[in-house]
Image (cartoon, coloured by chain):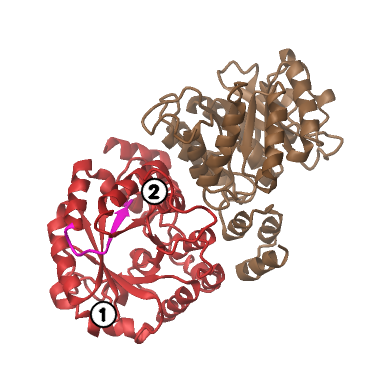
Chain colours: A brown, B red
Amino acid sequence: MATRRGNLMSVRDDIRLLDATLRDGGLCNNFKFSTEFVRALYKTNIKSGVDYMEFGYKADPDLFDEKEFGPWKFCREEDLRAIVGENISDMKIAVMADVGRCNFRRDFVPKSESVIDMVRVACYVHQMPAALEMIEHLHGLGYETACNIMAVTQAGAGQIDEALAMLNASPVDVIYLVDSYGALYPENASALAITYLESVEKVGKKIGFHAHNNQNLAFANTIDTLSRGVSFLDATVQGIGRGAGNCATELLLGFLKNPKYNLYSILTFIEQYMIPLREEVTWGYDLQFMFTGQLNRHPREALSFTAEGRGDYCTFYKELLDHE
Amino acid sequence: MATRRGNLMSVRDDIRLLDATLRDGGLCNNFKFSTEFVRALYKTNIKSGVDYMEFGYKADPDLFDEKEFGPWKFCREEDLRAIVGENISDMKIAVMADVGRCNFRRDFVPKSESVIDMVRVACYVHQMPAALEMIEHLHGLGYETACNIMAVTQAGAGQIDEALAMLNASPVDVIYLVDSYGALYPENASALAITYLESVEKVGKKIGFHAHNNQNLAFANTIDTLSRGVSFLDATVQGIGRGAGNCATELLLGFLKNPKYNLYSILTFIEQYMIPLREEVTWGYDLQFMFTGQLNRHPREALSFTAEGRGDYCTFYKELLDHE
């Protein structure tokens, strides 16, 4: 498993590119994307060869005030259909559901009545039993399921092994390695990916990778874990996402060799929609996020630093060290 | 050689961090840094544990109009001494000299009369004979020497082997793998680094890596080649450099485990000098530079695109493809 799977010239037909622009980008603007933006992104993703488009969260409206958020915080069936109709494209539709933040028994209809194809269940490692309950229910409804175990760089090695064993005994289709804090280097991202890959080898599940760009390594970590055998790759257009953001789709499309992937369509979307969006919404690599990545910490203080318009990086860095 | 040298927790005492802020950053502003900026950077580098500080080029004043450039295009002895005195610090002073753009027989004094410690000779692979002439002369004067072979991603594999053989027979101390176009991924950067390392194994020379950030991989490629055994690492503060820029010193300092390296001093310099500089000078990762990196091309068209203030990325991308 220490060798690479495929090489820099070849195509791997197990690769699945998942666009998380609305879901992770929505964390920057409370999911307030215009309908035009979402529709253009949907068409662009189809043309670009994206395999899954994640529209947002399936959050519980009892817990979150619908006036404060755009529709992609909740991903109601009617809002999805207003964009995708019956989604006659080959691209699959995904939504994310956080353990403890959604009413999954009430808010998911059977797959036969839904345009959603895949539900990604996000949880912390201590929430595995609740995640498994959701996965089993959603699998029973007919959905593809993925589990995104967050913040694994703060979990003990034993915990990850236990979580993987529990997921291997479940009907989940894809298990995601998530670098929540952007703390991983390619070397240890790949070591973790190999742990995940070896764990699922006998049960035939797929492994995904979700990067964060705190140390400007989102793309590097994505292609390094990919080269070890990870097949589900998350990316967002221009790396949009909370804080330092994610792996940029345009970088990944330049790397993937399958001719079904097309960079040019994404460029037209960037020019028309993302460049203007940058006037309103801030994201991307910056020193404050580098600090929290280097320190393997949640970016919350860095997000406050940004929101307050602070520029006193040295003082902020000392504050972080004081709170170690 | 396919394994890694050292690990993510340990210190490697062969590592040498070279700050190329003035030299590569000078390409963004014609080397017009204030004396205060240069003096502050010198003091900062010493405090941060930087091993070599490259002040700029030793360009031939007969070829370049001195009115158009700041002093660090020429690195005269008196200008260096105005900053460093006799340089009583442990940090060494480096300058770069381009084959064909310097009068090395006239403009270098014997090392015993100079504050310069190392001269880095930059050349294309077809200029090796001229580079070797310079290296031998400079070695004879008493300097440490390095050779930066540029644009190797466009050279044939045979050419690189021949250049390495020629350098191995020379007195050069360090051979640099240079990703001039930012076209390398960590996987092939490391494969090339291993070629360089294996080549010099018997003659005991050191290998360096100089990245460019066109695909946001400058830091990733630097730490991946480092992990294979590369020991001289180029970086610039905030990644300043022509076009997409370089590996950021602050990212590398967060990675290096030797306690002699200190991130905080660099942060104070960034806050006081680099953030204001960003108001006047533009550099860093952007789509136009990503294109030339993906296409393994010189960034000249992307630099023009930037200088003209263009934002029509799609048109530009098509122009690039037309000129393939």
Task: Answer left or right for B102 relative to B95.
Answer: left
In the picture as drawn, the residue positioned furthest to the right comes out as A62
**Residue under the point 38% across and 59% down:** B231
Q: Quick check: do tags 1 and 2 share a chain?
A: yes
Q: Residue B269 or A273: which is nearer the viewer?
A: B269
**Residue under the point 63% across and 22% down:** A84
Q: Residue A272 or B141: which is nearer the viewer?
A: B141
Choose top left, top right, bottom left or bottom right for residue A81: top right
Residue B117 magenta-drawn? no
Q: Which residue is mark 1?
A: B76
Q: Is residue A127 above or below residue B65?
A: above
Q: Residue B31 or B76: which is nearer the viewer?
A: B76
Mark 2 surroundings within 10 Å by alpha-carbon count, few (fewer than 14), some (14 through 19), many (20 or more):
many
Task: Answer left or right for B170 relative to B20.
Answer: left
Task: Answer left or right for A282 relative to B224.
Answer: right
User: Can you give x and y, in whole percent of width and height, for residue B40 in the image?
Assistant: 46, 78
Q: Which residue is mark 2?
A: B289
Q: Which mark is residue A94?
A: none
Residue B177 magenta-drawn? yes
Disc 1 is placed on an element classified as loop
Q: Residue B169 or A231: which is nearer the viewer?
A: B169
User: What residue type is disc 1 on?
Assistant: Arg
| Marks 1 and 2, how far apart at CA | 33 Å
Quadrant location of the N terminus of chain B in the rendered image: top left
Choose top left, top right, bottom left or bottom right for residue A126: top right
User: What residue type is disc 2 on?
Assistant: Phe
Q: Is residue B70 visible?
A: no
User: Can you give x and y, in whole percent of width and height, for residue B155 in the image?
Assistant: 22, 45
Disc 2 is placed on an element classified as helix
Quadrant location of the C terminus of chain B in the rendered image: top left
User: Can you give x and y, in whole percent of width and height, for residue B134 in the image?
Assistant: 16, 66
The magenta segment: B169-180
